[in-house]
Image (spheres, rainbow, N blue to C red):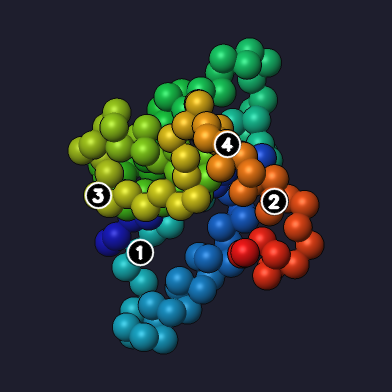
Amino acid sequence: CEKVLLIMGFCCPGDVWLPVVQELSASLYRFAGLSSGMQVCLYDNRGIGKSTVPTDKSAYSTNIMAQDACAIMDMLGWKAAHVVGHSMGGMIAMRLASMHPERVLSLTPMSVTGGNTEAIPCTLRSWYLGLKGLFTRTPEGRAG
């Protein structure tokens, strides 16, 4: 049975993944004739949704949150899973893969940066294009 761990990004509860899970389930049934054979786990990262809220800000590092993901897999009895992460969830997924490569069957980071200063534009042109996109009203103006 395939196992898939879905990790959501900053300030989003895990149930944001539900439409993806529903579509994936329907597609597997429709196109492959599969009605089961996959377990999917989505959860709330610490401080979001129904999870606990640590008061110490240092408890929100991607290292610690990757350990949370690993602990969830342990709780489910999963030795390994396909791991998908969106935005900050992708950063957590990449950290999980680097800390515990034996636990990650495949890694799909979506809309992810390396974090830290890598997320900050560092050239005049990138600042110009970012501000242009912010203040230009039409798609044609943003593209030009």
Q: Residues within 10 Å of mark 3 (few under 14, many from 20)?
A: some
Q: Which residue carries the number 1 mark?
A: 38
At horizontal 64% and vertical 20% (from top left) the residue drawn is 54
Q: Secondary structure at mark 1?
A: strand
Q: Secondary structure at mark 4?
A: helix
Q: Residues within 10 Å of mark 1 (few under 14, many from 20)?
A: few
Q: CA distance from mark 1 to mark 4?
A: 47 Å
Q: Which residue carries the number 2 mark?
A: 132
User: Does residue 100 appear in this view?
Assistant: yes
Which is nearer the N-term, disc 3 or disc 4? 3
Q: Which residue carries the number 3 mark?
A: 105
Which is nearer the N-term, disc 1 or disc 2? 1
At horizontal 79% and vertical 62% (from top left) the residue drawn is 137
Which image quadrant for residue 104? top left
User: Does residue 70 appear in this view?
Assistant: no
Q: Is residue 70 toward the left or the right of residue 140 in the image?
A: left
Q: CA distance from mark 1 to mark 2?
A: 44 Å
Residue 32 image offset from top left, x and y in percent: 32, 83
What kind of residue is marked 3?
A: Leu
What kind of residue is marked 4?
A: Leu
Query: Looking at the image, is mark 1 or mark 4 nearer the viewer?
Result: 4
Which is nearer the N-term, disc 1 or disc 4? 1
Q: Are marks 2 and 3 in contact (CB under 8 Å)?
A: no
Q: Are marks 1 and 2 in contact (CB under 8 Å)?
A: no
Q: CA distance from mark 2 to mark 3?
A: 40 Å
Q: Which residue carries the number 4 mark?
A: 124
Residue 134 image offset from top left, x and y in percent: 73, 50
Query: Looking at the image, is mark 3 or mark 4 nearer the viewer?
Result: 4
At horizontal 56% and vertical 57% (from top left) the residue drawn is 17
What kind of residue is marked 1?
A: Met
